[in-house]
Amino acid sequence: MDPRVREHAETVCDHSVDLQEGDNVVIDAHPVAEDLVTALHEVAADRGAHPLAVQSRADGRFRRAFLRNHDGDFSLSEHVMALYEEMDVYVAVRGSDNVTETSDVDSETQAAYNRATQPLLDERLSGRWCLTQYPAPANAQLARTSTEGYENFVWDAILRDWDAVREFQSQMVAVLDDASEVRIVSGAETDVTMRVDGNPALNDYGEKNLPGGEVFTAPHPDSVEGEVYFDKPLYHQGREVTDVRLTFADGEAVDHAAGKNESVLTEVLETDAGASRLGELGIGMNRAIDRFSYNMLFDEKMGDTVHMAVGRAYEETVGEGNEHNDSAVHVDMIVDMSEDSRIEVDGEVVQENGTFVFEDDA
Amino acid sequence: MDPRVREHAETVCDHSVDLQEGDNVVIDAHPVAEDLVTALHEVAADRGAHPLAVQSRADGRFRRAFLRNHDGDFSLSEHVMALYEEMDVYVAVRGSDNVTETSDVDSETQAAYNRATQPLLDERLSGRWCLTQYPAPANAQLARTSTEGYENFVWDAILRDWDAVREFQSQMVAVLDDASEVRIVSGAETDVTMRVDGNPALNDYGEKNLPGGEVFTAPHPDSVEGEVYFDKPLYHQGREVTDVRLTFADGEAVDHAAGKNESVLTEVLETDAGASRLGELGIGMNRAIDRFSYNMLFDEKMGDTVHMAVGRAYEETVGEGNEHNDSAVHVDMIVDMSEDSRIEVDGEVVQENGTFVFEDDA
């Protein structure tokens, strides 16, 4: 077994979920991730925890079979709920043998299933959890690279000194926590401002997401003004949307365009009232992630990028008394900040062409 | 997908476990059985049941990793117990990519784990359950045949008219239910008698075991007299024991011998007091099983055979007030009855060279 698999498992257990003796653990993974699940069993045994491997990922063949053969009148699985209620730690492993496996599941059926099983999701996210990635060939294919190249990419992003990452990123947290207005400028087409005062900035250093590597907060929903060109393609429900342009006025995306699959973008923005406003501003700071891989778990943490999500804001990024943007969607899109770009906070440049002011000191 | 996979899943759901709307189902299988687990999800969806796929088979790579890295001080997984308590149906699928995967797990560790998790096993067997087989290449290899040949063998044994099987076998149940003494004679080396009066004979027609195909009861533990030569090799803990001979007096195996690996046989018989007495007499009646495949789920149902198990008797085969043979082991061994053989019940021949008296009427 590649020794990085065992290191990966140790990082999940010791860093991400802080595994303790007696913890009841559920590991949800596709068989392609068998090596990692095996290593997680090794580490769990060593720490005196109780692992159970399940296979119920939303993008898998079993879920597809279930959804396509159901009459749509879904109800909660009480035995799975009982399992989750006694669970201390949930480890979800991305990675499959076909990333488009559920592309022929009717989206209304999918939505009905999600509504009926929402309490399972809530219960799963109520304790310690971690979402990570196994570098399977199908995911390498999605990233348009070789399997070996993808393994290096994934494990370089995951096997980091996360304490050092936390320290480094805490400087950006301090900047945003003091901020009132953030301005993002990139090239000739992106110049957008938004207010973030009172909204906490969170430091993602590889706990609930592995890899981590971003600092993120929520803009005030009605404060966003200006134009954004998203350099990196958006990959939504199996379709690629390129060259997305959004124009904001009073927080709302009043105009939008895309190069390819503009209708997908339109559909997202028209989901509900919150879907046409920003719910997140994130600063990607994991420089081990140096390529776009069509996988938001990695893409949004890419070094020298920022991302903005239309739709739902994370509860913990909205300060008391501030407005919370609510929506059924949360769709991230990425701006390349490596060239001809800057982030300004209350009129002061905090990042220029990818380099932060607190790095200039070094 | 081979259409027999879907038929297999339907047989499990509709015949073996009588799946009902709302049933909470757990399916425990290795990834090699992915097609069958997919089909079980299809059928479960169609019937309005709730399936969850887990991977916790005792012979798998995850269990091996867990056991080899544990200090041996095992305790119960409370979340798995909670899952089982809310479960209505348990489907266990045999089949793996290496049938000797756990051969390097220390047997004391294995025993300690089994003792600590006994309540899980009891809970799992307290409801509706089915143990079946997926015809994976490694299992074909164990059976010393091609994968295609093994697929045919497995599905021929499983996809039967189980109502007709029940009817046919009920004739043997009637014979044994009225019996006091059973005598098994085969060739020059097997002539053994045992009392079974008051002990119910059970009709196995593919419910808890799929394939089914046997009628079985318990001998009185102190009643067995005579000699048995077991024609078919015994495969115990990864080792093959050939040409087993047992001599019984007052129910106890007072003498034993084997061609290969006699020490394994000795170890079994010396496990505890009950291990040297019979706990089961079974009549194999599934003639679709025409070959030995080193898999007791099939071998013990083979047509034209009888099997006897040393060790524990099944509760439900011991009549009220009759003695129950208790033991930590239950090891089946098989006698070929196709030639120069007969089963006598209270002095009357009920089977000769594999043909039952109730078949003579046809």
Image (spheres, coloured by chain):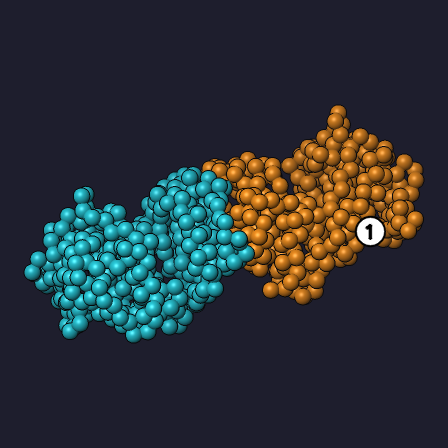
Chain colours: A cyan, B orange
Which class describes the residues within 10 Å of circle 1: few (<14), some (14-19), or many (20+)? Answer: many
Q: Residue furthest top?
A: B321
Check disc 1 and give the amino acid type.
Answer: Asp
Q: Is residue A42 visible?
A: no
Which residue corresponds to the image point at 49% horizontal and 38% vertical from the top-left? B82
Q: How many marks?
A: 1
At which x and y percent is residue A305? 22, 65
Please name whichever residue, A300 or B342, is drawn nearer the observer in this view of the structure: A300
At which x and y percent is residue A286? 25, 61
From the viewer's perspective, tell me whether residue B173 is left or right of residue A192. Answer: right
Q: Residue furthest left?
A: A347
Q: Is residue B13 visible?
A: yes
Q: Chain of mark 1?
A: B
Q: Quadrant of the N terminus of chain B?
A: bottom right
From the viewer's perspective, tell me whether residue A17 is left or right of residue B350. Answer: left
Q: Would you name the residue on which mark 1 appears? A: B304
Which residue corresponds to the image point at 50% horizontal and 49% vertical from the top-left? A73
Please name whichever residue, B219 or A318, is drawn nearer the observer in this view of the structure: A318
Q: Secondary structure at mark 1?
A: loop
From the viewer's perspective, tell me whether residue B180 is left or right of residue B288. Answer: right
At which x and y percent is residue B200? 77, 34
At which x and y percent is residue A22? 41, 39
